[in-house]
Amino acid sequence: MRHAHPVETVRAAEAALMARLPEGTLMQRAAAGLAATCARLLTRRRGRVYGSRVTVLAGSGDNGGDALYAGAALARRGARVTAVLLAPEKAHPGGLAALRAAGGRVTAEQDVGLADFSRADLVLDGIVGIGGRGGLRPEAVPYARTGRSGIVVAVDLPSGVDADTGEVPGEALRADVTVCFGTYKPGLLIDPGAEYTGAVQLVDIGLALPEPEVTALQHADAAALLPLPGAESDKYRRGVVGVAAGSARYPGAALLAVSGALRGGAGAVRYVGTAAEEVVRRFPETLVTEGGPAGAGRVQAWVVGPGGGEGAREALTEALASDVPVLVDADGLTELGRLGPDALAGRTAPTLLTPHTGEAARLLAGAEGGAPPAADDLAAARLATARRLAAAYRATVLLKGSTTVVADPGGAVRVNPTGTSWLATAGSGDVLAGLAGSLLATGLSPLDAASLAAYLHGLAAREAAGDPGAPVTALAVAEALPAVWRAVRQA
C-alpha cells in the first residue's frame, strides 16, 4: 500500500525527529537519497556520473537546500554542476557553501540558467517545496515553458503542484522522476498533479507517521482483497448481485453491467430490466426476474442505474428500500441528484455512488442547492470533490476520471494507480459498476469493493489495450478481467 500524508502531518513528524537528531541530519538523509537516485539516472543515461551536466534550480528554504546538497554530492563525483538561484537572498546557506566547496558553479542570471536548463543531462527541480501554494512564481515560469533535453528530477514534488490536493493552480514544472521524502504526498497520486510527477521514488528518512489520510492499493493489497471461493462454497454463499440496468434506448448498458458483474467474484447475477432477452442470449448463466428490484428475490447487493432511462427512478427507489448495499451509477445518479441526500437518510445498509464529474456536479447541486458546479472545476479538485460528495450523501463515493478517487464518509480516501487513457470509451463505466457491485455482494465493504474494482478495471484496460496501446471496447475490458485476477493472485 502506498501511504500519503498531508503537509501538516509531515512537518510535525519532521520537527519531532529533528529534535532528537544533530542539526542538519534530516536534510543530509534526504539529499543523500536524492543524489543516489540522480547518480543512477545519469549512469543509465550516459554510462557514468563523471562529466555529466547537472543544473540545480534552487528556490528558497529547505527544498532548495536539499537540491543544493544533492548537487554538491554529484559534483564530488565529477559532474559539472550549476546552481541557478531563483531567490538569491533566500538560498540555503549550508547547501550553497557545500556546492561551492565541491566545485559547483552558482549563478542568479536567468538567461544563463535557462540555457543551462535546456542543455543539461539532468535538472534538479528544487524551486518550490511541499509548503508552496498558488503555483509557480513569475521568475520560475520560464523553466516550465522552456524545452529541455535532459531528465528533470523533482525534489519532493514538482514545483507548482499542491502537495495536499494535486491541484495545479497555474503552471508547473513537469518531472520525469519525483523523489519524495518520508512519505508520499497526496498531490503526487492525484491528477492533475500526478500528471507532472513522472516515476515516483520514496526515500525513507526515518519519520514516525500516523495512519495515512490517502492510500493507493498495490498488487499485494489487491490480492488480499480478492474474494476467493472455499471448499464449501456454493453460488449463494459466494453472493448474488442484482443488476437493474438498461432501457429501450440503452440496452447495451445492461449487457455491459452484467458482463462486469459476472467477473466480479459473486456466485450469481440476477438481472431485472427491459433487456432480459438480450442479456440471457449473451449471458445464459444470468438469472432473470420480471419486474423491478422489489420483487426480484434475495440478493446481497444491487447495481442500479446504467442505461436505466425512464425506469431509473423506480428501480432506484425500490433498491434503496432494501437492506443490502446498493451501488448507484449513471441514470440512477441523475435521479438521486434530483431526490437529494434525503433519499439515503433512512438506509441501514451502505451505499456506493460511482459518478464522473458531470454526474458529481448534479449530485452536489441536489445536496447544496443552486446551479451545478462546473465539471472542469470539480475535475481540477478531485480529492476535495470526492470528499465533499461523501460527506453530503453519507455514502462511499467512487469519483471516476483520469485518477479515480474513492472516499468514504468516515474520511478514508484511496486513489487508484491503474488504468490507461484508452479506458475513456463508451460503456466502460457500466462494466466498472457491475464489477464493483459483484464485489459488494461477496461481502467486501464499499471502500474495499470500490478500490478493488477500480484497480482490476484499470489493469484489465491495460491488458485489453496492449503495449503499445490501441483502442479498446468496454466488453474487451470485461473479457480481460479473468487474466487480471490471475496476474494479481500470482503477484
Image (cartoon, grey):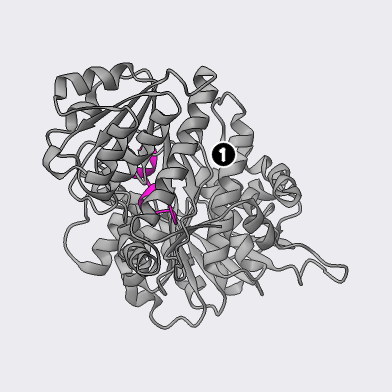
Residue occupying image coordinates x 36% and y 38%:
154
Magenta span has 189?
yes
Expressed as whole percent of the image width and height from the top left, the position of residue 66 reads 33, 44
Magenta span has 384?
no
Any part of residue 321 in sight: yes
Expressed as whole percent of the image width and height from the top left, the position of residue 104 reads 30, 27
Tell which of 251 and 240 is nearer to you. Answer: 240
Expressed as whole percent of the image width and height from the top left, the position of residue 338 reads 30, 65
Expressed as whole percent of the image width and height from the top left, the position of residue 376 reads 26, 45
Q: Categorize mark 1 by other alpha carbons within 10 Å: few (<14), some (14-19), many (20+).
A: many
Tell which of 329 and 314 is nearer to you. Answer: 329
Residue occupying image coordinates x 33% and y 73%:
341
Is disc 1 placed on a helix, strand or loop?
A: helix
Any part of residue 273 in sight: no
Write the start and end of the magenta stretch as one range: 181-196
Quarter of the picture containing the N terminus is bottom right
Q: Amino acid at mark 1?
A: Ala
